[in-house]
């Protein structure tokens, strides 16, 4: 249980941080989609470790191998199996913590749940698992591109350093221009400095990613439990280190009055639009055609290069020393993960919407 | 799609605001649980309309009728069907908005999705649907009580008026002592005044509910996509008017350093505990035995007693006038809904945990 | 687990033989379908007890009440909740077997599974549960009618008395002309006599139902596990008293050679057809546009009007006496149940087929 | 949709006959199970092609590679990813049928469903996909062994040549002693001769496999739709070439009277047993502790070494010539597939049974 996501456009992942490989099965991809492997691989590069001075130095090329579901460059409708080999596993790195519970990691909870754990690099609980999501998410993006839908995320906060501009004021195509993935060059510079100084302190820090989805057709969403934003929220909360999710006006909307918060409808050409968008493009759990936008909070990475007090499996007090290769801040590499999960949700709900009306059956 | 929640302990709901009835089927309730109908009914009273001056004046007794799954006072393991009749439907109230799209309601999006809609009181999109959840959630609570697990929610913010105490400083048993459901009497008083003044302005306002779950055993959670907090997040985001969810340190955790945020493990008697709880009782998506706590943001109710600009189905500009009976602030009545959804998640994950270890099969 | 069937067009049922009511939630019915209540009720009449001398004499009108999902005569896309009240419950009939395990009933197995059971009329294990399926299946039929698809079942065997004609030689519109539901009047007469003589012996007997589905478009089916015939098979095997399922050539096909069994393709007008149909309209788990046909075996009803040896919950030897009101042969009333389940499968797979091709998204 | 099977103990497969690899993700395997790779590989050998003169001569070693979920020889509770590389793909073999629809294959239906198809060896519709099932099924068998449950299948009919003994009269440990996998040596000899003569005729023939499951605890099954036999039936019907399924008395039970068919309960030592077993070990969809047994009908393989009339994608009349390497009769190699699917069902239902009773939560 828990390794699948989606209903019609659905992924199932496997793999541990230091096992032979990670992988994903993507089911439900409509037949006839051009599967551009170089695009998938380029998405993998955005997530891969060792890409800059502010990310972990683990070396992984994260090359994907497509094992099924694609014939002569097109999806066939059958499940697409993808494998990503682990190269730089260095399992010996982890012998020193084999029986210790690292603070704020999943060591203790996996041990409680299963009575056994693969301690190498956190095993299944490692964020390395998200590589498989990015591969599948890239295919979701290819599908959405065919429908004119874009999914763009960027770093909007590192620690308490916030990007003080709304997404509409930014050129989201500039996100990849810097290593922290913030589309505002000046703020990006300061974020990089902050992360680098935290790294030098042998510490870590949190951040926020904002995601914007444009050109979603109205009518996507599955009330009542599978509201579009509920599924997006779950998708985001399923990413390692995520502590919060808000869409549209979010937590700030709490302080508003209904008369301020309501988005008035107007006719614009052929379309019904709203004059404001506190709803974040979703009303009653269903897209209304406006931009969908949301924010995702990431905690500071739990692995720090410092000694910490903890206990081992026997319950004895021990010291956990900071070793290994880890990110001082997770958000730069998490941008493509957020996009991947968002694209998977939208693709899935797009397919689900195909059977809503009798007239379209 | 979208009307079910849960995997083993699973609900499916039906019903519209102004149809004959609402209802729920609860599957997977273990056999042998004493089903205390008066407790279920008391939970319904906490959510029902017309309970105080700061809630809608719609009159509904919300009496439940159990149609199956219970024999001689005990659950039998078969699905528990429950029906709640709508009494005070007053469908004529809604004729004036039959073809109009109310701002920030689901009128437009349902119409786009289905090409048809039950315009009476929002139909399925009405928060009235949550009555069915509270009935099923009450049974989840009965199950959790058997295991010593408690689920307690309370109002921690109305508009920008925040309860400035941590939940540990509060006596959560006082939550029901006032009509706004804030366990701090003084803050409660001010919240009630604020809501009442907003009501007199013919306007609405948002709020925040905090929820605390105690005595969850360690080991509950289903990584990677069905992390315990991801499912809690989805559960909350599926409630009407919710715009955000955060657990543990949440959005504030972003600004912390790893060295501050990490929760150190210690042995306390027989148990492994943590000295702080920024993790919010969940690590790697699995409970660690500490208190689980989270916050849920609710926007201001969309129905206001004022004239608003909008369009109708034909795309013509119209005025939507504020009529009907609605809550000036949704959080007082949402407290039992938050508890119900949280209880459903924990009950479900408790059952799921029964097949994790070979030794327990 | 186990009370839902279907993926997009999906039912969840509840209810016991002698509880207050049975019911069903139907999700995923496309919006805009005319819901003809009198048609649904007429399907209920075909299944209801007491309809002839060869069925149980229990008196139930089986009136449906639609509680949601229909507005102004049309489906709205939201879940359709239906309740059927039990009228003639006569619970006292069952006190004599409260702690006894009736042979070849589910008394023992429910007790083993749940440790508790509703002994009144078999509780949830009673075929009375299928009333809820027929109600939902009637809506599936209405949907299929819109697409020109028909689902027709009939009794093709009672005991060892077989209808020795292929379905193509029969006028399936004559099925309802007699109380045993066999479209061949002469055979029907003999079947009725056989059942009546068995009834007079205070015994019961089995039978076979054949079902034919016409005008299914090619392309329905979800390989590999959810092959169309696998889902039809499961649907049939989920009906009380069913012991076997075969489609197309079935068990007889075993003895054939490939050169005989293969169905040759030919062009017929605009369509690709097959010259024979041993495939039963399904190849590789996907419909090919030819008639889908299958056979379903029903065992003799377990309740007989004779004394039988058994044990009680304490393991003591007891005599189970034949009381109550039961069918001497289940197949006449099972015809609409087979049709209902088949219609549900086809409707579901029709919706699933809407997202197979990129060109149609 | 359609590539997953199971609820808690759940598999998802991918792969085509002539793509790079096949594979499976097994979720929900309880942690702590010893994963004997040599046993899994030995099950693969039983299914692999080229094993005898009466099977296809395609050469595949079907070596499994476990990519995740196993650490130091034990399952960890995380998904077990397994890949099986295709070695002897010979795609050029299939160029002659690239646009032709082979009779009674899935070529036409896949093309109708997806508008595109991988024509090499049937692509996803090839029985080669079942290799992935056997790998996962072997792990299910390892789990069942821990609980003392055995799953044994054997060939009980080839063409019209039937093994005229009940399974109780046979030594099922002799099944592997001959290449046709019939535990009766004399009948086996005749079956082999029959298959070989059919092969020499360049034709194919069908068969029946019987499967017996012993020592299942009472109480497994999920009424009403997921009855144990309904899930077994679906599992079997999802195997390539299967046309029918019956359990217990099956189609023969139709002709019996209730007074003959009913299985009387008796106390035997500590256990409640039945004196006969027409129920096939399942009553009301739940196991009763007696042997579960069922029969599965396989049609003759569609590929024959003869010229056949058909049409191509353009609808033109063409001749399909028999080439390639195929089985003259599928049942000898299908024995481990039937066992694998049965083991997967029982393992899944075993896990599902862990949350039935409050006393065991």
Image (cartoon, coloured by chain):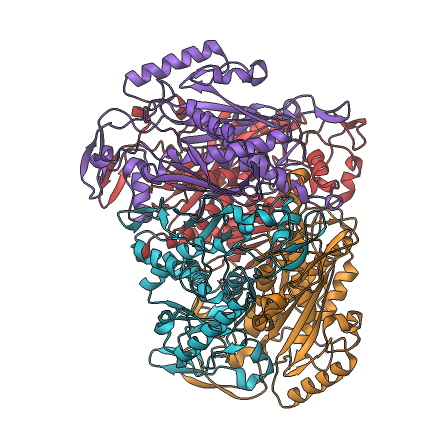
Chain colours: A purple, B red, C orange, D cyan
Q: Quadrant of residue D201?
A: bottom right
Question: Looking at this view, is B202 or B267 the one in front?
Answer: B267
Left or right, A138 with respect to D358, comes to: right
Quarter of the image containing the C terminus of chain C? top right
Residue B99 percent coordinates (x, y):
79, 35
Question: Looking at this view, is B345 or C26 the one in front?
Answer: C26
Q: Is residue C51 visible?
A: yes
Residue D117 percent coordinates (x, y):
60, 45
Q: Is residue C327 above or below residue C268?
A: below
Q: Is residue B23 visible?
A: no
Q: Residue at x 38, y 33 (%)?
A: A127
Check the image and name the residue furthest to the top. Answer: A186
Question: Looking at this view, is D352 or D347 the one in front?
Answer: D347
Number of numbered callouts drawn:
0
Residue C144 percent coordinates (x, y):
73, 55
Q: Residue at x 53, y 14 (%)?
A: A165
Residue C286 percent coordinates (x, y):
62, 55
Question: Looking at this view, is A228 or C274 the one in front?
Answer: C274
Q: Quadrant of residue A218?
A: top right
């Amino acid at each position: 249980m828990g390794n699948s996501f989606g209903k019609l456009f659905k992924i199932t992942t496997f793999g541990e941080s230091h096992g032979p490989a990670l992988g994903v099965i993507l089911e439900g991809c409509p037949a006839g989609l051009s599967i551009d492997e170089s695009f998938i691989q380029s998405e993998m590069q955005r997530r891969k470790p060792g890409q800059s001075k502010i990310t972990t130095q683990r070396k992984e090329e994260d090359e994907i191998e497509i094992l099924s579901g694609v014939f002569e460059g097109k999806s066939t409708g059958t499940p697409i199996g993808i494998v990503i080999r682990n190269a730089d596993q260095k399992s010996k790195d982890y012998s020193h913590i084999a029986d210790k519970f690292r603070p704020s990691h999943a060591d203790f909870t996996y041990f409680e749940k299963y009575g056994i754990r693969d301690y190498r690099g956190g095993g299944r609980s490692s964020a390395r698992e998200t590589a498989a999501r990015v591969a599948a998410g890239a295919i979701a993006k290819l599908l959405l591109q065919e429908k004119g839908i874009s999914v763009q995320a960027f770093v909007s906060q590192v620690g308490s350093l916030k990007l003080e501009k709304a997404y509409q004021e930014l050129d989201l195509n500039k996100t990849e221009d810097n290593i922290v993935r913030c589309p505002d060059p000046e703020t990006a510079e300061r974020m990089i400095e902050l992360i680098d100084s935290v790294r030098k302190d042998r510490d870590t820090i949190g951040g926020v990613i904002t995601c914007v989805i444009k050109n979603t057709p109205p009518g996507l969403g599955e009330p009542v439990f599978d509201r579009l934003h509920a599924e997006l929220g779950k998708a985001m909360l399923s990413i390692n280190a995520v502590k919060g999710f808000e869409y549209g006006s979010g937590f700030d909307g709490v302080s508003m009055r209904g008369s301020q918060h309501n988005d008035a409808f107007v006719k614009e050409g052929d379309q019904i639009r709203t004059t404001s968008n506190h709803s974040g493009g979703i009303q009653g759990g269903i897209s209304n055609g406006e931009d969908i936008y949301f924010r995702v909070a990431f905690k500071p990475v739990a692995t720090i290069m410092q000694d910490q007090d903890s206990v081992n499996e026997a319950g004895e007090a021990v010291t956990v020393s900071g070793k290994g290769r880890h990110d001082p801040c997770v958000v730069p590499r998490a941008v493509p993960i957020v996009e991947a999960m968002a694209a998977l949700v939208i693709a899935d709900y797009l397919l689900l919407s195909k059977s809503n009306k009798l007239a379209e059956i």
